[in-house]
Amino acid sequence: MTTRFHLLRWAAPLSLAIILGATVQSRGEDVSAWDKDTRSALRLIAGLTSRNGDAVTLRAGIEMQLDPGWKTYWRYAGDSGLPPKFDLSGSENVKSATVLWPAPRRFPDGAGGNSIGYLGGVIFPVHIVAQDPAKPVTLRVKINYGVCEKICVPAEGKAELLLTAGPTSKETALAAAEAQVPKPVAPGGEGPLAIRAAHLKTSGERRRVIVDVTAPESANVDLFAEGPTPRWSLPLPQPVGDATGRARRFAFDVDGVPPGASILGARLTLTLVAGEQAIEVTTGLD
């Protein structure tokens, strides 16, 4: 009887330790190890699985940390910089993987121009559809990117993470990054944040694109313009005229159009950022 009692006393803590160990291990699997490079580091984080009827989307994020004062770049870097290049081809059981871009900000590039990107750190959400939903997904990413303070240097990193349907400690951070991704909307909207019109204005030999937007009066508003392919290098739009209530106007010269291409008939992507809100419109010019 005494021997059995002592065995039970030892078995209970041992079982508890196994359970706690399994819990710690499962929590640890919601992030990969940090991969460090010059003035930066990156890793993968896992989010909760999203279900919409029969559609199942695995959610993850590429988290990048930067040293104080250092920046990295958006998909269009602006006047200078190196946009991140994501390679997810080494992943297992992945039918599709879409990298999303949180709304960026503009900052001086130190050479008289402006770049577009992120200061201090960023999480790029990734939405994954499995090839076989009954099997596990291993997400592997390789990234070439640039970081910049007063000088800009290239960096690279890689990370790997097994995605499961279990709980994750990174859901709040990932959801916050997803909320910062500009929402696709139609041009000409009438909401509190809208791109109402984009048209071409010609004066002599000078051609400019004029974009009228609506945004909250108190918001710090910015606009970014991209061409239909990465070969386009459109100037950063600048605010023009006086803001009247929520109406704002931006303009940029027709420059950076690839040889043989025309801005007339081209589909431009306009990203409007106002504080914590952002929208994205794909439109031609009136």
Image (cartoon, rainbow, N blue to C red):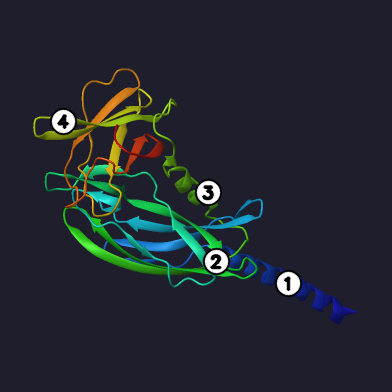
Q: Secondary structure at mark 2?
A: loop
Left or right, residue 52 beside residue 274: right
Label 2 neighbour load within 10 Å: few <14, some 14-19, many 20+: some
What amino acid type is highlighted by mark number 3?
A: Thr
Query: Which numbered dot is residue 172?
Result: 3
Check if mark 1's residue and mark 3's residue have beta carbons within 8 Å: no
The residue that mark 4 highlights is: 202
The residue that mark 1 highlights is: 15
Check if mark 4's residue and mark 3's residue have beta carbons within 8 Å: no
State the image quarter where residue 47 is shown.
bottom right
Label 4 neighbour load within 10 Å: few <14, some 14-19, many 20+: few
Where residue 39 appears, as percent x and y from the top left, is: 27, 61
Which mark's residue is nearer the viewer, 1 or 3?
3
Give whichever of discs 4 and 1 has the lower sequence position: 1
What amino acid type is highlighted by mark number 4?
A: Thr
Check if mark 3's residue and mark 2's residue have beta carbons within 8 Å: no
Q: Secondary structure at mark 4?
A: strand
What amino acid type is highlighted by mark number 2?
A: Glu
Q: Secondary structure at mark 3?
A: helix
Where residue 27 appears, as percent x and y from the top left, is: 58, 63
**Label 4 to label 1, Cα distance in Å?**
78 Å
